Image (tube, grey):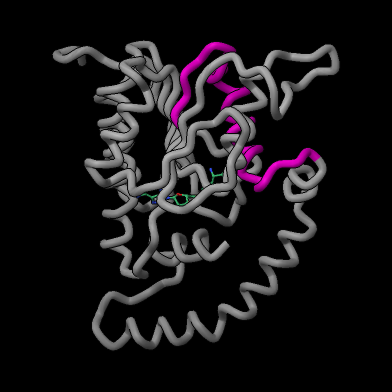
Amino acid sequence: MMGVCAVDLALGRGKLNLRHGRIIKAKMKTRTQSKKVNKAWLNDHVNDTYVKLAQKEGYRARAAYKLKEIDEAFGLVIPGHVVVDLGSAPGAWSQYLRRKLSPRKATGGGAAAGELNGTIIALDILPMEPVEGVTFLQGDFRDAEMLNRLESALTSRRADVVVSDMAPNLSGIPSADAARIVHLVELAVEFARKHMKPDGTLVVKLFHGGGYDELVKLFKATFRIVKPIKPKASRDKSSETFLMGRGLKSSGES
Ligand SMILES: C[S@@+](CC[C@H](N)C(=O)[O-])C[C@H]1O[C@@H](n2cnc3c(N)ncnc32)[C@H](O)[C@@H]1O
């Protein structure tokens, strides 16, 4: 929750004034308001349909339903796929992918354990409780060493799908935070260019206001098909949104 609020503030929703002095005032105001915001958020959270559904269906976070909706809208993941999950902790997207790549039972959804038809490689800077069948790598996606480990885990295969729910730690300084968000998305695009199949799909989280237009341009220059999506499970109040890019353009293709 703090991440989302911080992101909204970072992107100017908190009306932080960039001039020296006003920043401090705005920060103090933000702190005194934070208790109220926390209470309101907790209230919303407890009554949230997706939180209840996540508890019922055994997902670690309501975020699972964002990926589910994106998957259902674009037909992202099919059995046999190699999927890379960037910014995976606490693991709800990995859980969703795990179930999606399990052979379907007569009752409907795939199983959370057992046979797995495909590969899921998850990565996060934070630790993550294991998800059965998912290869988890802990480290910073911005580090070259982490990229080497990710490449090794792919064992010369290319990914069919790369999903990124990465959200950076924020400083509260809008321009710096927007730059961090842009940087993570740019790295995800670069990774997709190098390690995704030509007809593969990349989905990234980004934020309205935080270099959004610049990133749409980058997507359009990189992929044949580009679609924005704001899943219902993504809170209206949040500036969070997602971009899907499918089919890598070859060099020289406009
Ligand atoms: C919103 S959470 C992801 C939730 C996850 N998709 C799920 O379903 O449980 C964002 C994650 O991005 C991770 N993250 C942020 N910056 C990162 C980086 N540079 N490298 C790796 N992970 C990063 C954070 O640690 C955090 O766990």
Q: Measured along the vertical axis of the image, is residue 157 above or below residue 128?
A: above
Q: Measured along the vertical axis of the image, is residue 212 above or below residue 39?
A: above
Q: In this view of the protein, can residue 124 be seen by the observer?
A: yes
Q: Is residue 59 magenta?
A: yes
Q: Residue 98: name its quadrant.
A: top right
Determine the residue positioned at 73% across, 46% down.
50
Determine the residue positioned at 49% across, 48% down.
240
Left or right of residue 106: residue 15: left
Q: Position of residue 136 (x, y in %)?
A: 48, 38
Determine the residue positioned at 35% across, 16% down.
158
Q: Position of residue 129 (x, y in %)?
A: 59, 47
Q: Position of residue 70 (x, y in %)?
A: 57, 29
Q: Residue 132: name its quadrant.
A: top right
Left or right of residue 232: residue 209: left
Quadrant where the C terminus is found in the figure: top left
Left or right of residue 139: residue 236: right
Determine the residue positioned at 41% across, 82% down.
27
Q: Is 238 in front, or is 50?
A: 50
Q: Position of residue 22 (x, y in %)?
A: 32, 85
Quadrant where the N terminus is found in the figure: bottom right
Q: Measured along the vertical axis of the image, is residue 125 above or below residue 46?
A: above
Q: Is residue 76 magenta?
A: yes
Q: Is 136 in front, or is 243?
A: 136
Left or right of residue 46: residue 173: left
Q: In this view of the protein, can residue 207 be seen by the observer?
A: no
Q: Is 69 in front, or is 149?
A: 149
Q: Residue furthest left?
A: 252
All told, the count of numbered labels is: 0
Q: Residue 97: name its quadrant.
A: top right
Q: Is 46 in front, or is 240?
A: 46
User: What residue range appears in magenta?
Assistant: 57-84
